[in-house]
Image (tube, grey):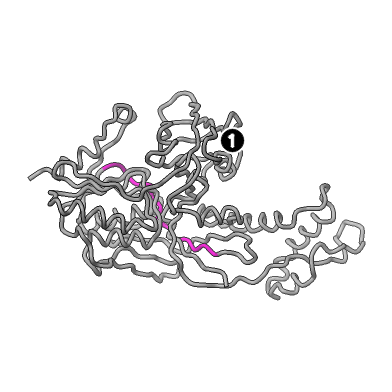
Amino acid sequence: MNKFIKFVLVSFPALFLLTGAFSGGFVVGHFTSLGAFNPGFSMPGIPGLPNTPVVSATPQAAVEATPDELQQLFTPFWETWTLVHEQYVDQPVDDTALMRGAIRGMLEALGDDHTSFMDPQEFEDANAGLSGNYEGIGAYVDTTGDYLTVISPIKGSPAEAAGLRAGDKIIAIDGDDMTGTNPELARRRVLGPAGTQVILTIVREGENEPLDVPITRAQITISSVEYEMKNDIAYVQLNTFGDTTNQELRDALREVMAQNPKGLILDLRNNGGGYLRTSVEVLSQFVKKGEVALYEQYGDGKRDTFETLGGGLATDIPMVVLINEGSASASEIVAGALQDYGRAVLVGVKSYGKGSVQNWIPLSANEGAVRITIAKWLTPKERTIHKIGLEPDVVVELTPEDREAERDPQLDKALELLSQP
């Protein structure tokens, strides 16, 4: 049986790592089996064309397998399939490509950025996500717009070193104009082995002219958690919500809490998300057992409730959470719950706004997977975040001038708030 993989897509819309891996958050859910799909049939003739027998490109069994109530609905599809096989100029056609294109078109017709098809290579990339080691430039990107758009560079990556920023739109790659090119195809153009160079032409808000940014690809290692003491304030930065994040976080909290800090800063800036279960585990470090972590709201009105797990190591210490436009999904689950409970003050700028839940279902015969939006998640106070984002309690911008001068007014404000009597 195929695995039915459930995502809270704790990441951005079609958010990919420019490392060859999808940064989607998922938990293994149910198991399901999809029957083999064998399209094709033969027709005695097409109106307006010579009434000659059509040489079937595919077996009659496909039509017979179509439910009776859908026979008439699917007649144009099979007519088109046969016409392509009989009349398209470049023969033989690629049946697999036609099949995958049909699936893509069907899902795109729903008009939902997060419901889509992944071919086998894309699905393999997706399953590689969050293991921590990749080759590429090291950036989270959005493939749902007109251009491939940077959401956030990974800390310590070539993308960060080259100065890529959230919101940068990639309009050309190695001098080739990407206008009209599917952003997913553009993403693949950016990928490449460590040591090779790619030149990205970007449009950046505030810049009058496009910028050429050369980047040398590298082996990317993503550390889930980084931490240190800033005088008497504990600082913990989460870079992703992966397999090892909860254990790394617990190790970090044990060390910093042993030093009796006055307060704790949880930095979720530019954290594109990760596994749903990890978001609940992370939240459980700061909120007592049995509290609502999030709701999943389905179209029929039903909902699932996720609760904190208990055993938290920092459930009472004063907290500030840093968020920005690169904080999404799993980050928003954690930050939103902490804000709802009054457990932490949110500092920074509005988060990205990704709050829908996807099921990823592998197709039979290793033909990729379909991703279908099945629910939206809500904060404990039943706030929806999708396409809205979280508003910080204290708004602090981080300007280009701050970056160039290596200033961090958002972190400074967090330290100030926690240092107050």
**Mark 1 residue crowding within 10 angstroms, few (<14) / some (14–19) / many (20+):** some
Q: Position of residue 11 (x, y in %)?
A: 42, 52
The magenta-colored residue range is: 348-361
Residue 38 in magenta stretch? no
Residue 356 in magenta stretch? yes
Give the secondary structure at mark 1.
loop
Q: Nearest the camera: 294 or 159?
A: 159
The residue at the point 61 percent across, 31 percent down is: 176
Q: Is residue 73 above or below residue 80?
A: below
The residue at the point 45 percent across, 61 percent down is: 7
Q: Amino acid type of disc 1?
A: Met
* Image side of residue 119 versus residue 126, left or right: right
Q: Position of residue 198 (x, y in %)?
A: 54, 33
* Image side of residue 189 versus residue 228, left or right: right
Which of the 4 image quarters holds residue 116? bottom right
Q: Is residue 296 above or below residue 188?
A: below
Q: Can you identify the residue that label 1 sits on? A: 178
Q: Position of residue 212 (x, y in %)?
A: 50, 27
Q: Is residue 93 above or below residue 195?
A: below
Q: Is residue 406 above or below residue 223?
A: above
